[in-house]
Image (cartoon, helix red, strand yellow):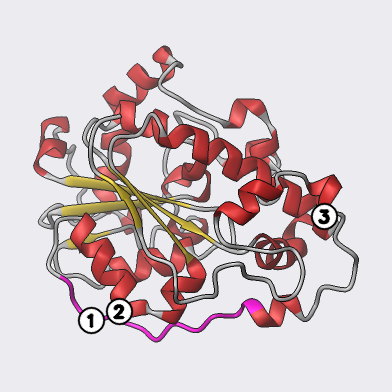
Amino acid sequence: MPRAARRELLPVSVTRQKMHTHIFIGGLHRSGTSLVHRLLCGHPSVSGFSGTGVPEDEGQHLQTLYPPAKVFGGPGRFALKKAAHLTENNRPLVEACKAELWTSWAPYWDLSKLVLLEKSPPNLIRSRFLQAVFPGAKFIFVIRHPLAVAAATQKWAKLPIGDLARHWVRAHEIFLDDLAHVKSWAWFRYEDLTANTESTLAQLYGFAGLEPVKPNETVVDSNDAYFEKLVEPINAKKIGGLEVIERFGYRLSAPYYEMPPGLGHVALNLSAP
């Protein structure tokens, strides 16, 4: 573990975690999770991981208690592995993480801040597990057009666009099923964040219990550049899950949106299921 990035070198009491609001950010690789993490960290009451020395400063790489996405094939593959989906039903793992996960992550946060963020793409299918480890935690999920995600992921996964889009469908099927078990969540589309950054961010700050602040960077939607690179035909039957794709206002052919960017909103749930 890269100790140079730690904010504290002394052991951190587990009891301190109750003093903070924990928010987990999830979404498939190349969906905008890093962008959302940076934007939220622009608030003076928020702390996230930075300068840790691990890929994208993701919490999944700063612990050894549960497997990161790379164990299951990494981007474009992990959600297809049943074992990658973690829930509260794995009691031994939950109990082990309750005892040790906070102490693994706390040294990388500024514990003077009220809200503590952890961002890892597989959180999209691990919210139930993380909720069991951190009771009272909140979850923010970013959703991005499946073809844009597939095209952006292709350089890493080396798979056909159709296979990567199928992975997107499976991941979001699991995600939607899991929401029924999660108490406090917010999800929104990347495209709506880029179209109305200040409004979307203000809603997320409100969800976190914070007063809004102005965005700390300019956000640009890059979906069109990925759509232009699509050269292979998209077999909707092979991908399946068209209802999941349409659930988020997307289409698999031009025009690529049932709901144009900027018309969406942040979906919220703040009550127990």
Provide the residue span drawn in magenta. Answer: 212-223
Pointer 2 with pointer 1, Cβ within 8 A: yes
Quadrant assignment, res 29? bottom right
Q: Cβ–Cβ below 8 Å for labels 1 and 3? A: no
Label 1: few (<14), some or many (≥20) within 10 Å? Answer: few
Q: Say which mark, if any, is on residue 198.
A: 2
Residue 247 location, x and y as percent?
56, 52
**Three-letter code for the amino acid on which mark 1 is drawn:** Lys
Residue for point 27% across, 32% down: 134
For mark 2, does the 10 Å Cα neighbourhood hold few (<14), some (14 to 19), or many (20 or more) residues? some
- Disc ID at residue 162: 3
> Residue 114: which numbered mark, if any?
none
Is the C terminus in the top left, top right, bottom left or bottom right quadrant?
A: top left
Q: Position of residue 77 (x, y in %)?
A: 71, 44
One can see residue 74 in this view? no
Q: Furthest residue to the right? A: 232
